[in-house]
Image: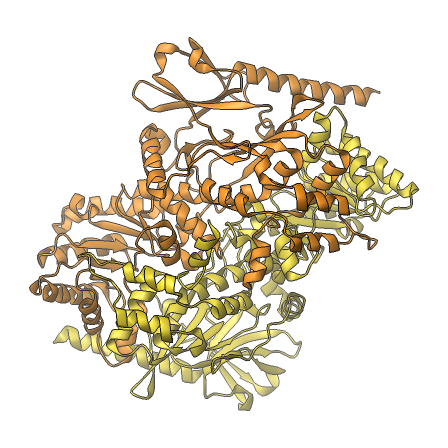
Chain colours: A orange, B yellow
């Protein structure tokens, strides 16, 4: 895409057409400035097929704020809308509406409350709450969902892969298989979720990290095509990067050629006073090969060199590799714990695309509207109770038990304060029978999850750096019960609603059903 | 992301770190300017789990060319590389190398041959061939793969969905679930592959199409929250868009409320001389509901209104809907063919993420290097023969039978001309036993697939507009055997190599095996 076109395609028009046609309906109906509240949340954890997440990692807020700050209707955008025609060749958008978009439309008229990036989040809990003029809040929908859905999806996948690798160094390698420039948002989210570095140079620059990477098979092939040998390629690499020498050993034959040649070069480096970094395995049975490579490296006196694994890794593959290493390494005289602690994981495609579940179904629903000076909760009844969002203004709380583990998220109405209650009633959001009472001595503390982000047109929130967000994530994951963290069949974390919210929702559903019933009788 | 950062993250540094560390090895070894050839191809069709593609649609070239034209090492990029440190705190990149990047590195030193966008393509066939200075061609890898992998993936999915919908209007609705700004490349690719329009306003502007979209559930909810009814929302919409009135009818109850209310409003529009467009169904059993909606619309005298379906559609879901309509519509007095021809498909998540197979494994492999004035074919031996790329300079041909259907793609060496041969020998690229002879009277014509794109630093290729690319795709798909187009278990299209290429490859493999064997003996 040309640069000029990119500014158009990624600005305020990075939206769905129906946001604009609806905005014109609101404008014409005179309700475009009515205060409205939209909740953003997702309905279920990513389901990867054989396995499923038990928690998500929230991400994307900072980039959304950057977009909101920049996006506005430029003259060129207005011109494009002006020339859109309806089916009988007349303008689709009227001049007065376009004037309003040009002169008065601004995201700074919105308030935004949100759960910060890096925090563990769960289904049906509002992650972001947008309040402001109906037409403005409506037009924000698409871009908000695009940014937050994707980054949360990838941060979640990264957290799983990092967990499965037992916190060993995790490198994001997916740029070539990512969905276009979404690669950069994906790499950022991966860093938030658990990747320690990325091979992506540009985003490393932007985020303030050194990018990671050494060489590919093509470097070995180049030397072979020049009539030289694998070891000549290794030596050329070692000469230039004597203190960063990590060699890819599977171009010809990992155990017959790659590792022995790497060891020769490592010995040469050692004589010159350099410390070799390690080897990378990119094909074959990575568990078996890493044991054999470790054995050879140990025997040659390089027990501290890293063994980087890559090639279609994900949380399950890594889990299997570790399991196999634990079982088989002793048979070859290799200490499995020592080996597992020298492993590094380079994860490409399956991290940056969230393999198995490549989208997060985050939604953005109208939950309240202020008309004639009074807020009215809004509801959409669905055949499946799971799809009926919680109406009205709400607050979100996290309750911790005496071990310091999160035991439930509680959604209340805005005027409720569970901190002041002696006993909490946690209701299942959908099942009228399921409820749970928590006496004050059954939990240690309650934490509100939303923070004010945009208030009265001002950003009151200072977005923390990635390193700080990574700490938030680490801290939150540690406060999850191990059952929730389990890779497969995780225990289901409780997301509950308060009795007052239950009653509001049930009353509204009843009211709409009643209206429909009467209409059908009449 | 801030605009300034975006320029950094999407410019020349939109690459993997190892491209740069390798480039420095080439620079230091004096081979950075040696002419090299890299082939770009994919190894297998997208496998969606229950179903698998039998062909792909090539896409992404124009945007790659735009990127190549803009990307260069800016002062800021060089500064970032300069400050990168190795493990002992010294600069990772040397000044002379950085000077070369700044002053001499240019993608205009590359030649590029490629199969045009929109064409049907198959595994192991080079889609793009890059020839030029080793270090420059190497650094292109990541961005080339990022752009071409993703757009080809999505164009392919769109073609499948369009096929399954029997060519009925297909709308791309996936912006909110796309991978960040990759949404735009995805929407473009969807248009190439088979989507007729997209809801994405910005990319519609850039590509010169009107965006599509009407209203969401939130518009109905807004009117309900104001104390009004669904029909009031419909009327408000119809008043503003009397000639474009397409109403979403499932907010309250599709058949009890939505469709009857829509019909009332359509009748009012008809009285005023307007032609209503139709209804959209976004939940429930879309096959059953579309039959019932059709019945009601027919009875009210609106047999020509469209019925737009959306909600997690993909090629299989659409296929099932059509099958069910064919079986069940007659029972309700609805002509199934007539109904199928009024259906429109709005496909979001599952198109823009290529649900079931969300990445394409395109690769970029060194196949030849010119050193000491002589081109040497390069090969990488792999344990799996499927992963050993075809070495050397090659040409790609498509052979058509007497029905005008494509019967095979043939990869030959560059100096071969199958047009001059009386009989063709098509060898399976991997299996030494499988071969097929074609006498001249057994095929109608042979077409070379590569076109020159960049030659001697100049773009000699004029990228056609999307409408033209769509024609190319349509034309190519029509020339596929129906078995290849089948959604499930497609017939396998033949990709063959010539006898001369077979001999070159076999000889090189033998030669490398021999060298290894001798090394192991010594």
Name the quadrant containing residue B12: bottom left
Quarter of the image with the N terminus of chain A is bottom right
| Relative to B209, residue A101 above or below | above
x then y, percent, for residue B381: 31, 71
Kindly indicate the quadrant of the structure image that contains residue A364.
top right
Quarter of the image for the C terminus of chain A: give it: top right
Give the left or right position of residue A156, taking residue A432 as reference: left
Residue sticking out furthest to the left = A271
Query: Is B74 on the left or on the right of B25, as rendered?
Result: right
- Please give the name of the residue rendered at 24% of the width and 81% of the height, measured from the top-left corner: A227
> What residue do we see at 31% from left, 31% from top?
A478
Question: Is residue B389 at all visible to an observer of this figure?
Answer: no
| Placement of B17 over or under B96, stated as above or below | above
Taking the image as shown, residue A64 lies to the left or right of residue B440, namely left
Q: Nearer the viewer, residue B503 or B110?
A: B110
Residue A420 location (% of width, % of height): 44, 11
Which of B244/A262 is in front? B244
Choose between B128 and B30: the one closer to the eye: B30
């Amino acid at each position: 895409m040309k640069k000029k076109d990119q500014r158009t395609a990624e600005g305020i028009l990075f939206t769905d057409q129906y946001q604009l046609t609806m905005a014109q309906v609101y404008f014409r109906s005179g309700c475009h400035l009515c205060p409205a509240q939209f909740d953003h949340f997702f309905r279920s954890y990513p389901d990867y097929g054989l396995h499923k997440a038990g928690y998500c990692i929230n991400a994307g807020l900072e980039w959304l704020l950057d977009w909101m700050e920049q996006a506005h209707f430029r003259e060129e955008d207005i011109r494009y809308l002006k020339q859109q025609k309806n089916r009988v060749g007349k303008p689709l958008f009227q001049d007065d509406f376009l004037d309003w978009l040009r002169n008065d439309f601004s995201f700074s008229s919105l308030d935004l409350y949100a759960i910060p990036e890096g925090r563990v989040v769960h289904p049906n809990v509002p992650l972001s709450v947008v309040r402001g003029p109906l037409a403005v809040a409506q037009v924000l929908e698409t871009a908000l969902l695009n940014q937050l859905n994707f980054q949360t999806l990838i941060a979640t996948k990264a957290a799983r892969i990092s967990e499965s690798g037992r916190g060993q160094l995790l490198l994001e390698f997916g740029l070539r298989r990512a969905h276009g420039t979404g690669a950069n948002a994906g790499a950022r989210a991966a860093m938030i979720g658990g990747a320690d570095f990325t091979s992506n140079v540009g985003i490393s620059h932007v985020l303030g990290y050194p990018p990671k990477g050494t060489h590919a098979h093509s470097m070995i092939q180049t030397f072979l095509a020049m009539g030289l040998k694998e070891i000549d390629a290794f030596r050329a690499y070692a000469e230039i990067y004597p203190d960063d020498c990590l060699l890819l050993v599977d171009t010809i034959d990992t155990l017959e050629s790659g590792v022995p040649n790497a060891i020769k070069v490592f010995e040469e480096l050692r004589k010159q006073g350099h410390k070799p970094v390690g080897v990378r395995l990119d094909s074959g049975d990575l568990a078996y090969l890493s044991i054999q490579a470790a054995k050879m490296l140990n025997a040659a006196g390089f027990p501290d060199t890293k063994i980087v694994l890559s090639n279609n890794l994900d949380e399950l593959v890594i889990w299997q590799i570790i399991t196999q290493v634990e079982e088989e390494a002793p048979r070859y005289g290799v200490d499995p714990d020592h080996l597992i602690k020298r492993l590094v994981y380079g994860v490409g495609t399956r991290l940056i695309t969230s393999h198995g579940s490549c989208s997060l179904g985050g939604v953005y629903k109208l939950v309240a509207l202020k008309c004639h000076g009074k807020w009215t909760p809004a509801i959409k009844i669905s055949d499946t109770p799971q799809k009926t969002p919680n109406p009205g203004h709400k607050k979100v709380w996290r309750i911790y038990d005496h071990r310091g583990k999160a035991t439930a998220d509680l959604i209340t109405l805005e005027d409720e304060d569970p901190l002041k209650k002696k006993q909490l009633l946690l209701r299942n959001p959908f099942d009228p029978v399921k409820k749970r009472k928590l006496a004050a001595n059954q939990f240690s503390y309650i934490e509100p999850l939303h923070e004010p982000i945009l208030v009265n047109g001002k950003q009151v929130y200072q977005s923390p750096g990635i390193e700080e967000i990574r700490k938030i994530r680490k801290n939150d994951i540690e406060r999850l019960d191990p059952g929730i963290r389990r890779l497969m069949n995780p225990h289901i974390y409780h997301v509950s609603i308060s009795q007052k919210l239950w009653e509001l929702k049930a009353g509204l559903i009843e009211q709409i059903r009643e209206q429909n019933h009467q209409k059908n009788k009449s």
